[in-house]
């Protein structure tokens, strides 16, 4: 087994174990996604702010094309998110999509 094949198998295992089913742009077939919530530090002059951020991670194999304004409904938590800026493809073939919750 080559290294790229091993990496793809590892990513598939991670998303199968830790991912949740999500429907991308109202598609009927769910894909496995991971919601990542973190806090970032931002500065405004002398003021330091803690800013909550959210991102959805989805494998390129499941969603080859991700765009700004795409939406993802995560079934298990019944929440919908919208991609707010250009997604980045990491070296493991996973899209990292900055999102906000749609209310």
Image: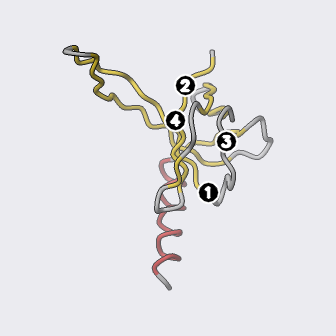
Image quadrant of residue 51?
top left
First in sequence: mark 3 or mark 4?
3
Which residue lies at the image location 54% right of the left edge and 40% below the top edge?
97
Front position in the image: 52 or 19: 52
Which disc, if any, is residue 98?
A: 4
Front position in the image: 100 or 44: 44
The mark closer to the camera, 2 or 3, is: 3
First in sequence: mark 3 or mark 1?
1
Q: With respect to residue 97, does 46 lie above or below? A: above
Q: Is residue 22 left or right of residue 19?
A: right
First in sequence: mark 2 or mark 1?
1
First in sequence: mark 2 or mark 3?
3
Secondary structure at badge 4 equals strand
Where is the C terminus found, in terms of image quarters?
top right
Q: Position of residue 60 (x, y in %)?
A: 61, 57
Secondary structure at badge 1 equals loop
Residues at discs 2 and 4 in contact (Cβ within 8 Å): no
Q: Residues within 10 Å of mark 4 (few under 14, many from 20)?
A: many
The residue wearing badge 1 is 60
Image quadrant of residue 30?
top right
> Alpha carbon of mark 2 to alpha carbon of mark 1: how far?
20 Å
Image quadrant of residue 26?
top right
Secondary structure at badge 2 equals strand
The residue wearing badge 3 is 67
Q: With respect to residue 49, does 14 lie above or below? A: below
The residue wearing badge 2 is 100
> Alpha carbon of mark 2 to alpha carbon of mark 4: how far?
7 Å
Which residue lies at the image location 29% right of the left edge and 20% below the top edge?
50
> Alpha carbon of mark 2 to alpha carbon of mark 3: how far?
14 Å
Q: Residues within 10 Å of mark 1 (few under 14, many from 20)?
A: some
> Alpha carbon of mark 3 to alpha carbon of mark 1: how far?
12 Å
């Amino acid at each position: 087994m080559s290294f790229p094949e091993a990496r793809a198998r590892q990513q598939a295992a991670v998303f199968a174990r830790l991912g949740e089913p999500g429907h991308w742009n109202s598609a009927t077939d769910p894909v496995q996604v991971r919601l990542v919530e973190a806090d970032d530090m931002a500065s405004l002059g002398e003021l330091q702010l803690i800013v909550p951020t959210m991102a959805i991670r989805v494998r390129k194999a499941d969603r080859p094309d991700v765009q700004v304004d795409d939406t993802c409904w995560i079934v298990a938590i019944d929440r919908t998110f919208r991609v707010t800026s250009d997604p980045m493809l990491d070296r493991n073939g996973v899209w990292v999509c900055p999102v906000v919750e749609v209310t």
